[in-house]
Amino acid sequence: MRPKEQIYSNYTEEDFSVWSILFDRQMEQLNGRVAKEFLEALEVIQFNRNEIPEFKKVNEILATTTGWELKTVPNISPAKEFFQLLAQKKFTATCWLRKMSELDYLEEPDMFHDVFAHTPLLSNKAYTDFFHKMGLLAEKYIDKEEIILKLQRLYWFTIEFGLIRSEGQIKIYGAGIISSKGETIHALSNDSIKHDFDISKIYEHDFRTDVIQEEYYVIDSFEQLSGSMDQIEAALFEEVKLD
Ligand SMILES: [Fe+2]
């Protein structure tokens, strides 16, 4: 059974080692590849190699920056529940870590993914403006399966696997890339296809969760996303006829 809440004294020496190893490894991989907004956010959120983040402290920092909070869950949440919590500025996060034998691959997200990769940017205003609006949009159409599927695709190709232009280069901001050793390199290499952000294309773009991505979408800024919400909502209905 996975823990439903964080009891800090339950972390083992192995947990601390796993956190340090992954932290060091990914910081090296991310050097020169990750968006500057992520590095700035990492400072704000005060993560470091020696300390597994304590949710209570993280939430205190988020409360003073964007008003978001982590909500602890044992496993990945169903899409509807996940989106409804986003609408309340709550991000669901696991509080357990993978074992030393699982450093490179894990079938379900652990807290290295949920916390190291996702949480820093929850302190960024423009990023959370977009993320919150996505939650509100999903809540509005929560019983429309086709709409929720499209918003899952939007989530996937931005928050999880998004790339961003920065000073003439393409950088990473998606958490699925940030927490993956292999994908950090692959995403920026010539082996993958990069599209400009295109909402209609994303809504029709099916994805797989069990393989490295072949295609990514590149935004110009988080403001581009938060400023496109009218278009993001309108495009939901391009192919869908609602009753
Ligand atoms: Fe994720």
Image (cartoon, helix red, strand yellow):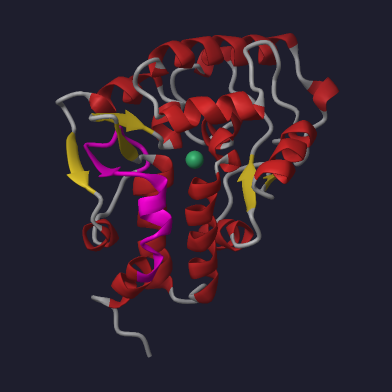
- Residue in the foreground of this view, choosing between 157 and 7: 157
Residue 4 against residue 28 in the figure, above or below = below
Magenta stretch contains residue 102: no
Extent of the magenta region: 209-230
Q: Can residue 229 be seen in this view?
A: yes
Q: Residue lying furthest front in this view?
A: 167
The image quadrant where one finds the C terminus is bottom left
The reply to whether the magenta stretch includes residue 221 is yes
Looking at the picture, how far across and down is residue 169, in whole percent?
Answer: 25, 28
Q: What residue lies at 38% left-to-right and 54% top-to-bottom? A: 225
Q: Residue at x 52, y 75 (%)?
A: 140
| Quadrant for the N terminus in the image | top right
In the rendered view, does 235 fall on the left or right side of 40? left
Instruction: Residue at 74%, 34% (x, y): give it.
Output: 55
Residue 202: quarter of image: bottom left
- Left or right of 94, for residue 173: left
Where is residue 239 shown, x and y percent of the image? 24, 76
Q: In terms of depth relative to the viewer, which is nearer, 161 or 229?
A: 229
Indicate left or right for 139 with 73 as reference. left
Q: Residue at x 46, y 16 (%)?
A: 26
